[in-house]
Structures are given as C-alpha cells and as structure tokens.
Image (spheres, rainbow, N blue to C red):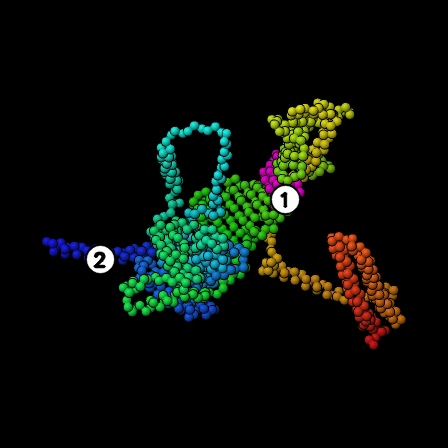
Amino acid sequence: MEVLEEGEEEEHEEEEQREEELKPLEISDKLEDLETKESVEQVYVPSDVPDFDWSSIDTSQLPSSYKTNSPNEKKLLHIAAHFLQQYTHICPDRKPLFLHPVNECGVEKFVSTTVRPTLLPYTELYHWDGCASFVSDYLIMEPLKSPITPPSSLYSPTTILKYQRGNCFDFSVLLCSMLIGAGYDAYCVHGYATREICTLDETLEVCPLLRKPQEVPKEEIKKSNKYRIKSPPDLQSKFKLQQKAKKAETEAAQKDKERGEEKVTEVEKPKRDPLHGLRVHAWVLVLSGKREVPETFFINPFTGNSHGTTDEQFLGIESVWNHRNYWVNMQDCWNGCKDLIFDLNDNIRWEVMLSGSDKPHQLLPDAEEKNELPDNDMDDVKEPEDENRSFDMPPSWVDPIQISPREFETRCCQGTKVTLYKKAKLEKWAPYLNENGLVKRLTVYADTECSEVVEVKEWFKNREDMLDLREVNKQTQLTTDYFSPGHLFHLKAHTYVLLEPETENTMEFYNEARVDGLQKRVQSAVEMTEYFVGRDDFLHVRYTEFGKRGKKVHLAGMRADANTRPIVQIKECFHRNPEKPADEDVAERIFLITEEMIHLTYHLKDNYLTASQKDFFKIPEGEIRGSEDVMTPDMCITYQAGFSKEEKLVHLYKMLQELTEVEKQLKEQVRRSEAEVLNILKTRENEENSIKLLVSIYDTERNEKRRQEYEAMKNTREDKLLGQKGQDLDYLAPFLIQIDNTEKMTKAQALRLRNDCLADLKRRLVNKANIIQARFDKAVEELQKKDEWFQENQDQLSAEEEEEFLARYSETTFLIHILSLRLKREKETAPQKYLALEEKLRKDPRFAEHLGHA
C-alpha cells in the first residue's frame, strides 16, 4: 500500500509540474488575444492628418553616421549584448530591455547614442515647460504597433522633426535631447502606464486652463493675552471625543463617496482595461538638483504636462537612459512608481550598464557564473565586464537638431491642433494663420457630449488694437475683452453685450497711463460710475445719474447734441486728506441738479459717531429779484459734529459760489466722459470690422512683401525724377535772367555770363573761408583768455570748479581743432571747385558756338 501511495504522489507531482509549465503558454496566448483585440481599438488621432508610410521616406541624403557604426559603437553593441544576456539570466521573468533598436536606415543603434543634447536659440525653449509644450504641439502622436511591446525601431530626432510624427519613444528622445541641452538632468523612461496616458485620451481629464490653483491656507496667528481669564478645564474624555470624530468623518466620507458615485455618469467612468499594467509607454524623468529643480518629476511627452513620481497613471519602470549611460530598475513596481527611489547611484536599486572605472560593479557573482553559465561562455562574459568599467559612451550619431524660426512659430502640423478634454475643447493655431490674429480657443460645454456651449475663451496675438483675450458667456451673451498696454484709449478690459451707446458696459483702464487716473467706468442707460486711483484731489468715485430724455424737437440753429440725457445728480467721494482737519475735509458731495441742492458730508472725526454735514439750496436764476436774495440764512443748513461754530454768510456765500462753479465743471466733465465712451465704442467697432495685424521689424519673412513694395515705389519715384536729373541745379539760372533771349546770345554776352558766374563762385568761396577764419580767431582768443584767468585764479578754485573749467577748456580746444580742419579743407578744395565750374561752363551746350572747347 505504501508503494502505491508513493507512486500516486509522484504522478500527482508530475501533473502539477506540467500544469505549471503550461501556465505561461496560456498567459501568452491570452496576451496575444488581448493584443489583437486592442490593436483593433481606435486610438485618438486627428482626423485631418493622413496615415504616413515610414517605409517610403528618403534616406539617401542622410550622413554616413546614420548608415554605419563606428568602432566604438560596435564595441558598445557588443557590451550591450552581453549585458542583456546576463540580465535575462538573472531576471528570466522580466521582459527584454529596449537597448539597440534599428534606426531609419535599418542599422542597430544603442538608445543612449540616439539622444542628441541641443540648446536651441529660442527663449521659450530655455525652460522645461516650453520644451515640453513645443514637442507636444509640433509632433503628431502615432500609437505603438503593439501596445504591450516596445517598438522595433527608434528613428533619429532630426527625422522625427522633419516628418512631425512619432510614437512615445520618439517624443521622449526628442524632448530629453532638448532638456539636457537646456541644462536639466533629464532621462528617457521605458515603462508602463494607463490606457489614457498611452493613447492620449484626455476626454476624462480637466483642461489645464480650467484647473484652479490650490490655495494654501493661511495659519492664523493666535495672540496670547496673559491677563485673559482662563476657561474651566474640560472634563470630557478626549479618547471618546476622538473616536466619535473619527466615526463622524468616516460616515461623512462614505456619504460623499456615495453621492459622488451617483453623480458620475456611466459615460464619465473609464472603461475597464484588460491590458492594465501591461501597456508600454515612454516618458521623461527630470531629477532634482540641476536648474534649481526642487523635486523629481515626470513629463508626459504627448501632452507636455508634468506629473509627480507618485502619480497613479504611471504603473512601472523597466529602464532609464540619457546620453551617457543606461540604468535598469531593480525595484519592485507592485505599487506603481509611488515607492521608487530615483537615486541612480544606488547600484542595488538601479543596475548601470557602463559602471565606469571608479565604480566597478558586476551583474553576476563569480559563483553564479561558474555554476550556472556554460563553460564556452566564460570567456565571452569576462571580457565585457573588464571593458565596461573603463568604456565611455560614444558621441551621438544624430546630426545637430535644428528648428527654423518659421517651424518654431508654426508648431502644429498645418498650423492647427485640436484637443478634447472633459466638457471642453481646446484649439490652437499658428500666429498669422488667422486674419483676426486668433491663436487659441477654449470652448467649455455643459455636458459630456459637448453639445451645449457654456463659455468660449479666445486668445489673440499681434493685434494692432492690442486685444489679448476675449471671454464670451454664451448663456448671458456677455463679452469681456482684455487688452495689453498700448491701446489708443489705454483700455485694459471691456465688458459689454452690444457695442452700442447707452448700453450696459464696463471699461477698465491702465490708470498709470491716464492723466485723470481713471481706473474703471461702469455705464448703463440711466447712470455712470467712474473709479479713480492716485489723484491729487483724493477723488476715488464719481457717480452720475441721468434722467429720461424729452421729446426730440428739431429747431433751426439747434446743435446736434442738444438732445443729450439730462443729468439728475452727480455724486463724488473723496479719500481722507491728512493735511486738513476732518470736519473741513469733504468725504462726499452730491449735486442734486434738478432739485437745485448741494449736499456735503465731511470725514468722521476721531471719537465721533456722526460726521458734519452742509446742505446748500440754490435759488433758480429766474427767481432772483435783488441783491438781498443772493444769500439768506435758510439757504444753508449746517450740522456740526461736536463744538458748533457759526459761520458767516459771506463765507457760506463764497463756498456756494465755488460749489456752483464746480457743478458747471462737473457737468462738462460728464459730457466729456459720455463723448469718450461714444468714441471708444465707435473705435472698437471699427477695429473689429477692419482687423489689422502687426509685424515685427525683425520678422524678415513677413517684411519681405513690404520691402518689395517699398523698392517698387522707390523705383517709380526714381523713374519720375530721372528726366529732371541735371536740372535740379542750374548754375547759370541767376545770370540768364539778365538776358532777354537766352537762345541767341552774342559772344560778348556769353563771355560776360561766364566771367560773372566764376566771379560769384570765387566770392562765395572766399566769404565762406573768411567766416570760418573769423570763428577760428574768436575761439583762439577765448582760449587765451580762459588760460590767463586760470593761471591767475588756480589757487582759489575748488576741485569741482577746476573740473568744470577743464571741461569747458577742452570743449573750446576741440572747437578750435574742428575749425582748423574745416578751414584747411576749404582752402584745399576751393581751387578744385573753381576749376570744375570753369570746365562745366566751357562744355555747356549754350556756349558751344561762342567759347568752343579749347
């Protein structure tokens, strides 16, 4: 019986071994089935971008480094092959490393030599976010052929830039090359991520432009008061209170979770991914330290967004590399990348391929080599171990990365890009592609199907009217325009529904650029409020109320603006003027124009509850009968807070006169404000109807058309003036007036004209020389006087006076030098000018028959 039981046990063990051997095959079959199903799934790619055949690209013009390997590259491939052999021996369950894929010419190249550090001459690309944004916008995403295996080829960044498309590995190598060139400690990462990351599906993500920054709560500073009465001690059990609070928090969290699950619709929930944890992805790792990076983070090259190393969307890392070395992750990724330590110098957590001569490290112990590897492989294994200790990474085989200014400006393929987010759509355009200067538009929807538009934001560039941003609320039809400094009316923001007069609109201004310090103006059909900043008269608010218009009647001689809105009242508010007493500093004054009344309220005095006030009642001009009615005691009602001091009627009368004059000026100011509003609305309407874009003087490509137009206009002008060439200056014109008939001259007249012309030139040359000589003599005389005065008063002069005198002395010396040079030049050129004119006169066709050419 015992023998039978032992046989049965052996058979049972053999069956278990067979089942274990068949499990990997079953898993691989399942993965293949899932892979084929996933390949059928559609990955989001812009619909306007056609499929591209990489096999049809032209590689004939590529350099020889693309088509062959140098001796050092061959040696590196030999080391990589042995490194991979040892890695597969130690970690047989892990997938093969991404080490030496083929390039566009079909030549195997080590991945580190494909990285080409480059610093491009654009300010925006000096920072990581600018580089990431450029790569994500410039390239078109192509999914991997197999979502669970890395690609078999890795093309150079120059080829990827040329054709503007690539997979995640191509994106990462290009971005890593730019970041390393900009000084960052960046690495390409081969790992695993979620389906949304790998397929560039952002339909469940909130648009970055809509994410609100996290507010850091401010800690309240508790002021201690040692004289405060202490509260009685709390005799309740703190443990029971803590347990009660924890229970309440758990119940509240459970309720919130249930409510949140109820709110989330089935469309918003991500579908279950059968390949979760198996999808291959490549991204960029930026370590802290260089370029003042405070914390290590990831960059998704597809979107250009940064992620923390604990982000749940990144599920594991196989290896990382840069242009100097290659590291294999030896840490467990059961919890994604949350627990990974990115200290690449830790040889236990990260296995380095080229350890260097200063840090020798063997992948396999000697015992394992002797016991587990065949004898015929011993020599092959020892050789790379000795070599990789002192072997340095060969330089990159890739040509320098170059991006022209036009390519950098255009960015997106065909100049446009569309990205779908959760209840939002983001569109981007290249500058100057749209005639209205539109470069970016964000459309926010109310539902996930993106059928009901809630809000639209549009960004502009190079607008002549300085418009930067426009926000349109589709529900209220309220439009807000934001302007950069430089607008004709110094506009900063304009909120409106219609660009029509006497409609509700709000205008904000750059108050620093305005003389009146106007910051904001809010207007409607019945009122207008103006806000001021930094005025010398401490005015900060002016409120105007309008009444209804009367019936419009056209009379002869009536002005066009006679039917303006009547002003009911004007109210002004002032800040405190510290140079005046509070009961003399006006805080608010109201001009009730229709009621012929002026109300003044003064600032509140210290330790008082009420402020002083004055009410002035004006007598209508038609009711004034005599001088006795100009000012009476009942025309001013005064309330004085505190000690009351009776004011004389003369003082009140002068104050009333000043306020009446101020009222007239305010009416004119309100009319000017109304006219300015009308002018701004008309200007904005004209700017929107005829939009003009500005072109920088440094933009040589777009200024080429203007340069050609200028040259054509210049050539036309020269053609018109070509017939007048030689007639611009007729040296005989003043002398030919003396002769009636210039066509027929006698010999005596010709000789006389010739002699008069030469004599006039000689006289002008002599006068010019005499004027220069006189100025020269005067300057020399002034210099001598200054020299004599300095010799007499040198001991009495201070250091500042002496320095000032020497400066003036040097100016006079310089003037003498210039005059001497001009005088010398005139004396040298005068005979040449005389002979040149004599030669012209001798060859003049008008003297030909009388003077000849002898």
Q: Earlier in the sequence, mark 2 or mark 1?
A: 2
Res 764 quadrant in image: bottom right
Q: Is residue 486 above or below residue 70?
A: above
Task: Residue 649 in the image: state x and y as whole percent.
Answer: 74, 25
Q: Which residues are magenta?
A: 501-527
Q: Position of residue 637 (x, y in %)?
A: 68, 24
- Rendering coords of residue 777 (x, y %): 83, 62
Nearest the viewer among 392 and 367 is 367
**Is mark 2 in CB contact (under 8 Å) with mark 1?**
no
Q: Three-letter amino acid code at disc 2?
A: Arg
Element on which disc 1 rests: helix
Residue at figure coordinates x 32%, y 59% from the top left? 91
Residue type pointed to by label 1: Glu
The one nearer the camera, 231 or 400, is: 231
Label drawn at residue 512: 1
Residue that protrudes farthest toward the bottom in the picture: 854
Residue lying farthest front? 795
Residue that extends furthest to the left in the rendered view of this protein: 1
Say whether residue 213 is magenta: no
**Residue beneath disc 2:** 18
Nearer the observer, 662 or 42: 662
Question: Along the horizontal axis of the image, is 742 left or right of 212?
Answer: right
Query: Residue at point 81% right, 70% down?
Result: 831
Element type where label 2 sits in the image: helix
